[in-house]
Image (tube, rainbow, N blue to C red):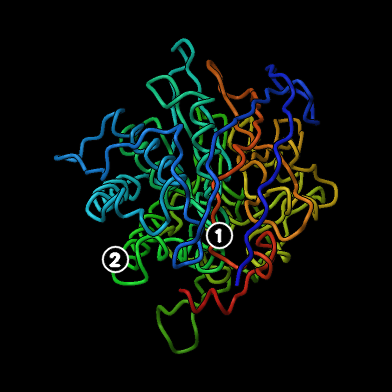
Amino acid sequence: MLTQPDSPKPSPPPPPESTELTTTEPPSSTTTTSASVSVSAATSSDETGNPSPSPDPSQNRPQIPITWPSGGTLTLDWVTNLMSTFDWSSRNLRPSELPTVLPLEAFDGLILTASKILHKEPNCVPIEPDKDTVGASVVVVGDVHGQLHDVLFLLKDSGYPCESRFYVFNGDYVDRGAWGLETFLLLLAWKVFMPHRVFLLRGNHESKYCTSVYGFEKEVLAKYGDNNKGKHVYRKCLGCFEGLPLASIIAGRVYTAHGGVFRNIPATPSKRAKGKKNRKVILSAESVPLSLGSLEELSKARRTVLNPPWEGPNLIPGDVLWSDPSMKPGLSPNNERGIGLLWGPDCTEDFLKKFGLKLIIRSHEGPDAREKRPGLGGMDEGYTIDHVVPSGKLITVFSAPDYPQFQATEERYKNKGAYIVLNSPNFDTPIFHSFEASIPRPKVNPYYDFEDVIDSDEELDLTKMVESS
């Protein structure tokens, strides 16, 4: 049986201030903010072993259940009500009571509307904020991993999406944290409300394999039932994951993707076997020397897969979602993870120069992953500047503070989360905002065996991935 972790103790934040970053080390003048929330103690457990929360007198009971509006047109009030209702329910209701808050009919309306929008977007979404609009900005957010209360704080701290404020979320909405479903749904609500201002990209955890290992599947079944309803909700989420774009390019200057760059897929040679007319010999993409791919190749990759392939001709989705930077020059297979690539500063320079870019902003690595990466900075502040090259920079941003929510080691990382703001007119000078976790979090048990699963996704169980596909 899984054990209930102790609630982490908050540490006092430094005074907030802001600066534009030009150095390779996270300076102390980066904006840092903290979030304090009131939460009631759990006094008993439900039949699933999750603590039963006591009512929180500081929060008014919202009007529930939430209903899907006729015609499917969302308003700002509807979206912000969904946010506050999810916050309230996480503190006052058992997980199994979520259907009383968001009935299946409302879930279906939201997930189907969002899926239609997402599936129509290209693999690499062009984001073109008006450089002449005063105060125009793009907020780039990294992994959030089901840490609902930190996402709620981030949205309020950076300002809600609006006509002059764009958002790019860089994937990994679910798994590990206890509120992956609520987190993903509230971001979908923002997408439906402002489809040309809010952009959701896919992370490696938006897959059947990862969600079956790191908790999201069990979370959904715990909340909507281990029956047809729960399985329906999970299947619809998987279908929505398949529609998430792989990358974006902001103002023609900034490439964002969850993992990073990708390989060139060589054209099929036109050798013919003896006696067989018009039969082509197909060479494995892994059998040729690695080189960087083109944006045209990215646009043609098949992203509608439950699990990005680690072999075969469709390797670009796996590269974009799973790859990591390295301080070693060159492009090589990412053997630690079993999928994707490792790329050095020379590849960052080649990629930026080839496509006329100034920045690569990626995510994918939290404090647990970074402590095992020699030569790369830690994730204490929620971001690192990994490569500084003549054409620009490579940045990693991670937006889940005090991660992971459930940690097997006694000493926690106590990392900050961060988001990046890109301002007009060029949108290529990153301003970093670090923030503390919203703690203590409501009491809840994990949905995966965090003491035994592979740490930090560092190696795929390929047998399980095949089975899950």
Viewer-side label of 1, 2? 1
Label 1 vs 2, first from the N-terminus: 2
Give the camera-side residue of 3 and 288.
Answer: 3
At label 2, which amino acid type do we have?
A: Lys
User: Is the N terminus in the top left, top right, bottom left or bottom right quadrant?
Assistant: bottom right
Q: Please tell me which residue is depicted at 15% across the width and 39% down the height of the picture.
A: 71
* Image x and y of residue 58, in percent: 46, 32
Give the camera-side residue of 419 and 444.
Answer: 444
* Image x and y of residue 81, in percent: 33, 34
Give the camera-side residue of 340 and 112.
Answer: 112
Residue 254 relative to residue 48: left or right: right
* Position above or below: 215 against 103: below
Q: Which residue is mark 2?
A: 229
* Image x and y of residue 392, in percent: 70, 30
User: Is the C terminus in the top left, top right, bottom left or bottom right quadrant?
Assistant: bottom left
Q: Which residue is mark 1?
A: 445
State the separation of the CA atoms marked 1 and 2.
22 Å
